[in-house]
Image (cartoon, rainbow, N blue to C red):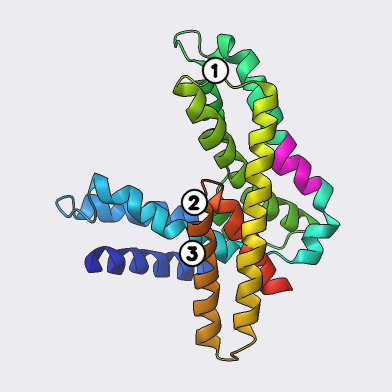
Amino acid sequence: MIITLLVLLTILFLSIEIQKYLKIPSPITLITLSYGFYYTFPNMRLFSEESFAELVIFLIPILIASDALQLKLEDLKRNALSLLYLALFAVAISVIIGIFTAHIFFTDYNLSTGAIIALFAMVLATDPVSVVSVFSSFKVPHKLKILAEGESLFNDATALIIFVFIAVPMMNGANIGAMDIAIVSLKVIILSIAIGLIIGYIGILLMKLTADPMSELVLILLTAYTAFEVAEHFHVAGLLAVIVAVITLTTL
């Protein structure tokens, strides 16, 4: 595990420095360096198939928290309607279009409605890390930056909710109608936001007790991981809870 961490941190450091001096977005160098390492040391296994999923889940709160730190509450309020459309309605509309056009694009596959929803939910989830990285390399209008970064974060949460709470149960044989989808979605979104707000507010109270930069960094990570774990415990969207908790912690 130590070797895995060293390799990942080295690749991340090089990607950040290359982006800083050569203006090449870090996702490009991350992928390039990762493939380069794999082909240079083909016999070195950094993690097994079993531990890969755990590693991804472990890193998700850090990645989401780092991107949520870039967003300000005032910007979110100012562009709330646009973000709501991009991150919620646009994703839902795209999934619905996918369901009704599946017979055209997937004629050779006998996909169920649940499988189609799962496929489109995965495809529609943009990568917030890549968006933030690319936008940090260029001068773009502030509103465009907020819309792109906010949408990339919140639509990940939307896609995850659709995938976990709608697509997976349908693939397992559950009979879910439009009303069920609306109720489940509202329940998950409201509970996730509530958990994020509560954990974020607790983080604010703790943040007032210290002025040490290292302690503040630890509190940000603690807030992110606590929100994720509590939300997952109650079977709601940990991703959305992390976003809300971090934004609450850093803006209120």
Instruction: Tell me, yes or no, if residue 107 can be seen here.
Output: yes
For label 1, the SS is helix
Tag 1: residue type?
Thr
- In which quadrant of the rendered view does residue 75 lie? bottom right
Whole-Å distance between the Cαs marked 1 and 2? Answer: 26 Å
- Disc ID at residue 113: 1
* Mark linked to residue 232: 2
**Disc 3 residue type?**
Tyr
Identified at 54% across, 61% down, the residue is: 227
1 and 2 marks in contact (CB < 8 Å): no
Q: Amino acid at mark 2?
A: Glu
Structural distance between the alpha carbons of marks 2 and 3 = 10 Å
In front: label 1 or label 2: 2
* In front of the other: 84 or 33: 84
Q: Identify the image quadrant of the N terminus.
A: bottom left
Disc with the residue nearer the chain's start (2 vs 3): 3
**Residue placed under numbered mark 3 in the picture:** 225
Does residue 155 show up? no
Q: Could you tell me residue 96's position as x and y percent?
A: 67, 22
Q: Earlier in the sequence, mark 1 or mark 2?
A: 1
Q: Residues within 10 Å of mark 1 (few under 14, many from 20)?
A: some
What residue span does the magenta drawing correspond to? 82-89
Q: Nearer the viewer, residue 149 or 23?
A: 149
Name the residue located 59 percent from the left edge and 45 percent from the top edge: 156
Could you tell me how far apart the alpha carbons at marks 1 and 3 are, in whole angstroms? 33 Å
> Residue placed at 34% from the left, 48% from the top?
53
- Which residue ends up furthest to the bottom in the rendered image? 211
Q: Do residues under tags 1 and 3 come within 8 Å of each other at their CB atoms?
A: no
Instruction: Count how many numbered circles sit on residues in the image.
Output: 3
Give yes or no for residue 83 being in the magenta stretch.
yes
* 197 in relation to 219, above or below: above
